[in-house]
Image (cartoon, grey):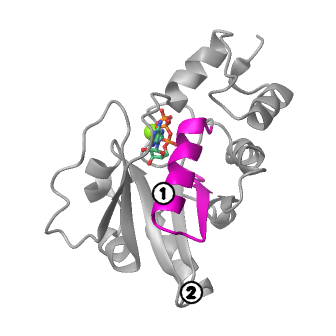
Amino acid sequence: MGERIGIFGGTFDPVHVGHLVAAVNAKHALRLDRVIMMVANVPWQKVGRRSVSPAADRLALVEAAVGGVPGVEAGRAEIDRGGDSYTADTLQELSEAHPGAELFVLVGWDVAPELGTWARVEEVKRLASLVVVNRPGAGPPRGLDGRGWRVEEVTVPNLEISSTDLRERAAEGRPLDYLVPEAAVAVIRERGLYAVGR
Ligand code: ATP
Ligand code: MG
């Protein structure tokens, strides 16, 4: 049997425990061998709407955050590839690198309704199963049935945490502790991200 690999893509600006709890619970529920937290190089759907921290900083945060979590790792393939990040390219690359592996793309409830806007979505459907996890602030996605997705639903603890809120907290000098893994908070401080301590 091939490896079962979860791909959890995100901007992770910054990574937070909501991401990690979703990753480990999806890993457990679906008996995945590992989950790759794939850091988007250019999250093209967010560009122009807000400023996105440099990819190298976001990767450093995810690397720090997953340090002690077995089977959860930081993915840098989209950064190494450069340019806009497309999940279809990432899956293509992974399926070539790991023939026989079963791929699972993880998304939260807020992202699931946007799948239709993804580039080359038919390729994504062909190459991977979709894993949908609950997230406060959004409802369960409708309209995935009959569109050719292989869907798995995983229920995770509801954690009302978002990177948007964390960036605001940091800018206002409010604490990120326990919402962001300690090692990642240290990287935020070291690098002076999100104007912490301004
Ligand atoms: P932003 O507010 O900047 O959009 P975010 O918190 O939504 O940040 P992203 O990097 O956009 O984080 O999300 C990456 C993936 O993680 C998405 O699939 C999203 O649905 C999922 N996700 C983010 N936060 C949670 C959470 N608290 N619970 C479950 N899933 C989450
Ligand atoms: Mg988001």
Q: Tell me: residue 170, above or below residue 180.
A: above
Residue stretch rendered in magenta on the structure: 15-42
Asked whether residue 62 is drawn in magenta, I would say: no
Q: Nearer the viewer, residue 38 or 118?
A: 38
In the picture of the structure, the residue carrying the numbered disc 1 is 26
Quadrant of the image containing the C terminus: top right
User: Exactly how many numbered labels are in the figure?
Assistant: 2
Q: Position of residue 63 (x, y in %)?
A: 75, 50
Asked whether residue 22 is drawn in magenta, I would say: yes
Evaluate if marks 2 and 1 touch, with contact meaning CB atoms under 8 Å apart. Answer: no
Q: Position of residue 88 (x, y in %)?
A: 44, 70
Front of the two marks 2 and 1: 1
Residue 85 visible to an observer of this rendering:
no
Question: Which callout, 2 or 1, points at the residue further toward the start of the chain?
Answer: 1
On the rendered structure, is 72 left or right of 154?
right
At a point 44% along the width and 64% down the height, the residue shown is 105
**Marker disc for residue 48:** none
On the rendered structure, is 51 left or right of 44?
right
Give the residue type that dot 2 points to. Answer: Glu
Q: Position of residue 51 (x, y in %)?
A: 56, 32
At a point 68% along the width and 15% down the height, the residue shown is 175
In the picture of the structure, the residue carrying the numbered disc 2 is 96
On the rendered structure, is 72 left or right of 85?
right
